[in-house]
Image (spheres, rainbow, N blue to C red):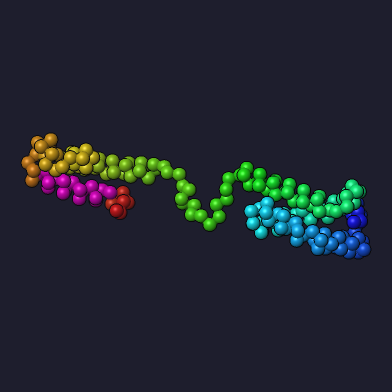
């Protein structure tokens, strides 16, 4: 292979450009197929990654053409295989170093559980409870927040069972109204 001039020294003439095109075509024709088969084994059959690695390998060979002929090797293939293997290893290490990509996944599944909604609901209900009368607040706290049945709450508060039942009914209606005033619809 004819050495390629260092980039940036002077403008490429049309013969240099055609020689450059010819060189990359020759590299591709001679080495792309076998190199692709080798890299496919390295990438576990991922053809897209293998093609990218082969392309990068051939590009590096083209960029370093001025050095490759001076090392006295008969074939470029061992050098290309080594470069391709190193690129594959570097890509693998690079992928292992960063978190996995999340394409086509529902991002709500990654949300961290926090208690913001629960705290807001608790604050809203507590605020609504403060607006109820003392007797309504007592019966609701006894039945819903302390987990007692209506007969147990009636006994605890010293109320007849019928009175306790009606207080629960009217207290729930008053609480529903207070919550609706605060924007709670359910």
Q: Where does residue 100 sit, x and y in percent of width and height?
A: 57, 48
- Residue located 77% across and 51% down the image: 81
Side of 23 where 155 appears, left or right: left
Query: From where the camera sits, is residue 121 visible?
Result: yes
Query: From where the camera sits, is residue 8 visible?
Result: no
Q: Reply above or below: 12 against 114.
A: below
Is residue 169 a member of the stretch shown in magenta? yes
Location of the N terminus by quadrant is: bottom right
Side of 102 where 144 appears, left or right: left
- Residue located 33% across and 44% down the image: 121
Q: Nearer the viewer, residue 95 or 158?
A: 95
Q: Where does residue 176 sit, x and y in percent of width and height?
A: 24, 50
Q: Where does residue 29 sit, x and y in percent of width and height?
A: 81, 63
Q: Nearer the viewer, residue 118 or 57?
A: 57
Task: Assign the magenta stretch its main secondary structure.
Answer: helix
- Residue located 90% across and 59% down the image: 12
User: Count of labels shown?
Assistant: 0
Q: Quadrant of residue 10?
A: bottom right
Side of 5 where 132 appears, left or right: left
Q: Nearer the viewer, residue 164 or 46?
A: 46
- Residue located 90% across and 48% down the image: 72
Q: Quadrant of residue 19?
A: bottom right
Q: Where does residue 95 sit, x and y in percent of width and height?
A: 63, 47
Magenta stretch in the rendered image: 163-179
């Amino acid at each position: 292979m004819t050495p390629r001039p260092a980039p940036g020294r002077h403008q490429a003439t049309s013969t240099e450009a055609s020689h450059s095109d010819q060189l990359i075509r020759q590299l591709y024709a001679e080495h792309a197929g076998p190199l692709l088969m080798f890299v496919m084994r390295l990438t576990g059959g991922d053809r897209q990654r293998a093609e990218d690695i082969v392309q990068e390998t051939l590009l590096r060979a083209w960029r370093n053409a001025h050095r490759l002929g001076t090392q006295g090797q008969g074939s470029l293939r061992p050098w290309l295989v080594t470069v391709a293997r190193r690129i594959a290893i570097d890509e693998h290490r690079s992928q292992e170093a960063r978190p996995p990509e999340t394409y086509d996944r529902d991002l709500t599944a990654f949300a961290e559980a926090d208690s913001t909604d629960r705290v807001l609901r608790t604050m809203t209900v507590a605020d609504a409870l403060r607006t109820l009368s003392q007797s309504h607040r007592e019966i609701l706290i006894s039945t819903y927040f302390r987990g007692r049945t209506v007969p147990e709450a009636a006994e605890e508060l010293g109320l007849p069972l019928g009175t306790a039942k009606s207080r629960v009914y009217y207290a729930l209606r008053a609480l529903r109204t207070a919550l609706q005033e605060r924007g709670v619809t359910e």
